[in-house]
Image (cartoon, rainbow, N blue to C red):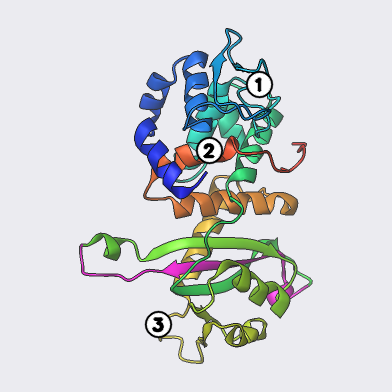
Amino acid sequence: MSSAEAIRLARVLRPPASLRELRTRLASEADCEQFVFQVRFPQGFVCPRCAVARGWRLHHGRLIECANGHKVSLTAGTRLHGSRQPLSTWLYAAYLVSTLTPGISALQLQRQLGLTRYETAFQILHKIRSVLVAPGRERLRGAVEVDETFIGGKDPDRDGRGGDKVLVVGAVELLNRGAIGTAAARRPLGRVRLRVVANASANSLAGFVETEVERGAIVRTDGWDGYRRLARSSYDHRRLVQGKNRTARPVLRHIHRVFSNLKAWLQGTHHGGVEPRYLPAYLNEYAFRFNRRFWRGPAFLRTVMLLLEPARPHPRKHQR
């Protein structure tokens, strides 16, 4: 779905402004089915098997029959295909994940949705997280700060950059501040990108920048050698070194703030109990919510859109 189509759909469906409104508008499973139908087929039904543009809903709820007699499930081929959970459970979960500022843990989701098993809540969360980063998304542009951090706790036997469990590299756009009191002044940071990397080599760090940031952008990093090749990759690379004067203004303070908030979220909402193999999915969730922090309603609608796109692999079962 293109950006123009997504904007048109947002105007037609008007995302719910609160949980109360969500529960009012999607009070029954039939309401949820109609909502999902509108999101998946904003231009009207088109059969995925024969492409005929005529069809009708059957009395079996999620089934649609096209003019050629093909019966298609409302969720066939999507992340929701084959799920035994009601659509209301998925829509409520998508709303909580995409709109709550601190996010929500699997245990909290289990309680909020009245699920009997923790594993069910965990799988719902990870299926949602797995779709939050859309393929082919736009790269960061303008001025960008880039740095790396470790997540997962200290290893007492190692020091320096190799002293923690998982290395994460991040980049954040810097917006023009504008006049005091304007929207631009209140939103100095744009979008963020985060990725788990194997090490702090040039292939990992500079490779991340080359994938996530447009050529020609101003890229601010520290003095680590892993970023040196950016100057040869059509970037305006500016290496910032703190030096001995610790009273000077901190360098890369914006990406450091992003990392600080990320760690506080992992520690506060998830109590630091994120396994390294699942960390990329948590980074997806954090980046998605950060990038849409001023647009909570559209964030929910975008989450539902991504859930209804063709399915992609997601993390497998987790044992508590």
Residue at disc 3, secondary structure: loop
Location of the C terminus by quadrant is: top right
Give the extent of the magenta segment. 158-181
Location of residue 147 in the rendering, given as x and y in whole percent from the top left corner: 57, 73
Residue drawn at point x = 38 percent, y = 19 percent: 24
The crowd level at tag 2 (other Cα within 10 Å; few <14, some 14-19, many 20+) is some
The crowd level at tag 3 (other Cα within 10 Å; few <14, some 14-19, many 20+) is few
The answer to whether one can see residue 100 in this image is no
Residue at disc 1, secondary structure: strand
Most foreground residue, 267 or 175: 175
- Three-letter residue code for mark 1: Val
Most foreground residue, 138 or 156: 138
Whether residue 319 sits left or right of residue 236 in the image: it is right
The residue that mark 1 highlights is 72
Q: Say whether residue 24 is magenta.
A: no
Residue drawn at point x = 44 percent, y = 42 percent: 5
Residue drawn at point x = 39 percent, y = 21 percent: 25
Whether residue 16 sits left or right of residue 149 in the image: it is left
Report the residue that reaches farthest toward the bottom: 244
Location of residue 31 in the rendering, given as x and y in whole percent from the top left corner: 46, 17
Residue 299's tag is none
Residue 249's tag is 3
Gap between marks 3 and 1 measured at Cα: 60 Å
Most foreground residue, 277 or 140: 140
Please report whichever mark, 3 or 1, sits nearer to the chain's N-terminal start. 1
From the viewer's perspective, is the residue at label 1 or at label 2 nearer? Answer: 1
The residue that mark 2 highlights is 305
- Three-letter residue code for mark 3: Arg
